[in-house]
Image: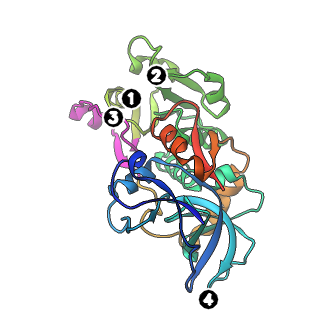
Amino acid sequence: MKAITFSRIGAPEEVLQLSEVPVPVIKDNEVLIRTTAASINPGDFLFIQNLYPEPKKPVFPQQVAGNHGAGIIEKVGKGVSLQPGGHAAFSYYNSWAEYVAVPAEWLIPLPADYPPELSCQFVNLITAWDLLKQSDVKPGQWLVLTAGNSTISTLVSQLAKQQGVPVISIVRHVKQVHLLESLGATVVIDLSAEQGNITQRIMDITGNKGVNGIIDNVGGPVTGELIRCTAFGGKLIINGGMSAEKYTLHNFDILLKGLQVQPHVYRYFFTPPLPEDMAMLKEIAEMTAGFTSNVSAGHALEDFKTAIKESIHFSEKGKHIFIM
């Protein structure tokens, strides 16, 4: 079968290659998935550079890249209750390949008609769901998202709109304001065109009430400005650090606003979904089946160089995925 592999640590553009490797042989409690689509995420590049903590470490030679995907169940091992022919998403290892062996406990069953461009990045839908829950923003209260063009932010926006939560989407530059608004953003702030104080701009938008939640994927000076326009008791959820810049705060910027600062880590990073999570995961699938994905291109595995290059150098055009 075809797979994108690497046999040394390094920059993805330098170490990845298209390889022919054997179709995996499944063990007890494993499932053979015929991959239909696999997403390309920033975390995949961390794995290739050996930056993830244990046990997320590559094994050489020919470690198959990719951590998230979806496909059709081809075979099941002893002890597996799932049936061949079913559709499932997974966040595990080895997704950039035509077939992958996955322990059954890591699979998330999905309806047969669930969109492949969403199923292969179900990790992002779970993350968006959890971020909105963690922010604790109520209907009518304001939520701010940084990196508004990103996959996570567009998915959070759509969930927030369903729940009556107005969203301020902050972007470095935007050419399609109407697109972000159609994806749930109430107001889009373009930093490249903005003049003056962002804090005052947000206070004006919210009628001087401030924002109750910030989901920050970037960091840098803008985060400091956003903190200063939170309502009392608001939350800052840190979900990324795209900016290399820092920001400066005084204790009173946090203390006098009763601000809670929390990190977010993907809930299934180290451990698989629990049986009692399946009802929640089913609800996420039902609520998001009609969502608009920001996938801009689907690539064959043979076109991996283009897919990787355009994913590393993120543009407004959207996410790139592999289609098998």
Residue 3 image offset from top left, x and y in percent: 55, 61
Residue lying furthest left in this view?
250
Q: How is the image coloured?
A: rainbow
What residue is pinned by disc 3? 257
Is residue 118 among the parts visible in the rendering? yes
129 falls in the magenta region? no
Tell me how far mark 3 sits from mark 4, CA to CA.
Answer: 55 Å
**Circle 3: residue type:** Lys
Which structural element holds mark 1? Answer: helix
Q: Is residue 262 left or right of residue 40?
A: left
Q: Amino acid at mark 4?
A: Lys
Sequence order check, earlier mark of 2 and 3: 2
User: How far apart are the alpha carbons under marks 2 and 4?
Assistant: 57 Å
Give the quarter of the image for residue 139.
top right
Q: Give the label on residue 226, or none.
A: 1
Circles 1 and 3: CB atoms closer than 8 Å: no
Residue receiving disc 2? 202
